[in-house]
Image (cartoon, helix red, strand yellow):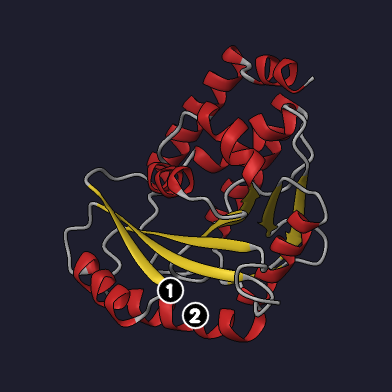
Amino acid sequence: MTEKEKPSVNIVLPVYNEDAELSASVTTLARFLRKQLEDFSWHITIADNASTDKTLEIARALSRKYPFVSVDHLSRKGRGRAVKHVWRKDEYDYLAYMDIDLSTDLRHFPQLLRSLERGYDIAIGSRNTRGARVYGRGMLRSLTSKGYITLIKLIFWVGFTDAQCGFKAVNRKVITDLLPHIKDNEWFFDSELLIVGEKSGYRIYEEPVTWIDNPGSTVRVMKTAIGDLKGLLRLFLGRPWRKLRYGRN
């Protein structure tokens, strides 16, 4: 199979002030993809969220060193903004993103792509489904995470078990038909994509993952929680999937 015949995937790495681990993580990811994703034509895009340290400088050095790495620089912060920016401009068969700390074991990534080839629209890593393994997460963050997904299930009656794991992939139909309706540009982006996606009829695959907490994470729990609650209220009141479901019939 030639490179042109292989299905293509772009893996987005959204980053903000990650100069300490960016180079090592990209090298680790590239080494894995070379060995375990030979049947795909893959690319890595570093999406810099207005970093103020040396992240952008390192990212550009990596893009010069490796032909399979490119860089997009955004002048405003927001993980959702960065992911959507890159996903929208690409013409790959599949688009993915993962957290730069590689907290999720990379061995699960090929399964996300295989599920999309089998007909699923969205593939996610789940830390809460049967078979998942989670290490190093504190009690507060565990309770917050489980309480959040329980709240989502109670309000929206959806089936997915993990909204916030930074390990996802989608097909082109999601990019062209669903992504334009996803409004959030920050941490709620993942939840909105999954809630609106499932309620609109898109098929979601969950891969039970091994996940190791990163104690140096820059996520601010309280600020993120407030944004999530505001996002849930907006979706509950607006119910955007009603219009989308009609459009799919």
Left or right: residue 137 versus residue 217 is: right
72 versus 211 height, above or below: above
Picture quadrant of residue 81: top left
Picture quadrant of residue 20: bottom left
248 versus 221 height, above or below: above
223 versus 65 height, above or below: above
Left or right: residue 9 versus residue 150 is: left
First of labels 2, 1 by sequence position: 2
Left or right: residue 199 versus residue 11 is: right
Mark 1: which secondary structure? loop
Classed neighbour count for the residue bearing mark 1: other residues with Cα under 10 Å, few (<14), some (14–19), many (≥20): some
Amino acid found under the numbered disc labelled 2: Ala
Q: Decide which of 102, 181 is in the foreground and name it.
A: 181
Mark 2: which secondary structure? helix
Which residue corresponds to the image point at 42% horizontal and 49% vertical from the top-left?
86
Left or right: residue 151 versus residue 21 is: right
Image quadrant in which the C terminus is located: top right
Q: Badge 1 is on which residue? A: 68
Instruction: Tell me if I can see residue 21 in this picture.
Output: no
Q: Badge 2 is on which residue? A: 30
The percent position of residue 186, horizontal first and vertical second, equals 41, 40
The percent position of residue 138, horizontal first and vertical second, equals 54, 63
Instruction: Tell me if I can see residue 169 in this picture.
Output: yes
Which residue corresponds to the image point at 26% horizontal and 62% vertical from the top-left?
17
Amino acid found under the numbered disc labelled 1: Phe
**Do tag 2 and tag 1 residues touch (Cβ < 8 Å)?**
yes
